[in-house]
Image (spheres, grey):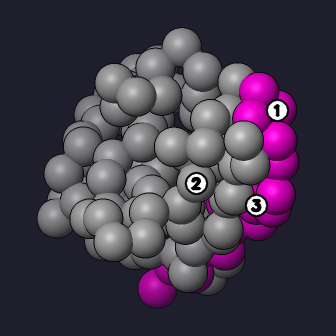
Amino acid sequence: QVQLIESGGGLVQAGGSLRLSCAASGRTVNTYSMGWFRQAPGKEREFVAAISWSSVRTDYGDSVKGRFTASRDYTKNMVSLQMNSLEPEDTAVYYCAADVDNSYHGITRSQADYDYWGQGTQVTVSS
């Protein structure tokens, strides 16, 4: 089993930055592709970003492309999401997730492909 714990959320003004972290325990996630998703009040959970096991490939949702950057630290068994130029529309609970079945360079946007999920961290962007 893998436990994922997100941190780094909080309240920030529009235009500001936050860095989310997702720490894994129970098993290494260094050989899993990892994803970030978010869910705003009254909306469905949506894809934000993904990074392959190799870190060679990344993918971003259209609304965050150019502003968010996913990365991973193999020595700490964790992944991060750097969020810049935040907008009120980015307000949501952010979740990290692990996909255990993907290939070395594989990534996916499909929530159904992810096997483990964190509890989420709240990000609030004020205007």
Amino acid marked by disc 1? Gly
Where is residue 63, by image quadrant? top left
- Label 2 SS: loop
The residue shown at (46%, 85%) is 1
Labels 2, 3: front one:
2
For disc 1, the neighbor class at 10 Å (few under 14, some 14 to 19, many from 20) is some
Q: Looking at the image, is 41 positioned above or below residue 72?
A: below
How far apart are the two marked residues, 2 and 3, measured between alpha carbons?
10 Å
Q: Which mark is residue 91?
A: 2
Labels 3, 1: front one:
1
Magenta stretch prevailing secondary structure: strand
Quarter of the image for the C terminus: give it: top right
Instruction: Identify the residue under disc 3.
Output: 9
The residue shown at (82%, 32%) is 16
Q: How many marks?
A: 3
Q: Looking at the image, is 55 positioned above or below residue 91?
A: above
* Residue 117 in picture, x, y percent from top left: 44, 74
* Residue 25 in picture, x, y percent from top left: 67, 76
**Residue lying at the far front of the rendered structure:** 127
In this picture, which residue range is highlighted in magenta? 1-23
How far apart are the two marked residues, 3 and 1, measured between alpha carbons?
12 Å
* Residue 12 in picture, x, y percent from top left: 83, 48
N-terminal-most mark, 2 or 3: 3
Residue 9 versus residue 55: which sits nearer the camera? Answer: 9
- Label 1 SS: loop
Q: Which mark is residue 16?
A: 1
**Residue lying at the far top of the rendered structure:** 66
For disc 3, the neighbor class at 10 Å (few under 14, some 14 to 19, many from 20) is some
Residue 42 colored in magenta in the image: no
Work out whether residue 102 can be spotted. yes
Amino acid marked by disc 3? Gly
- Label 3 SS: loop
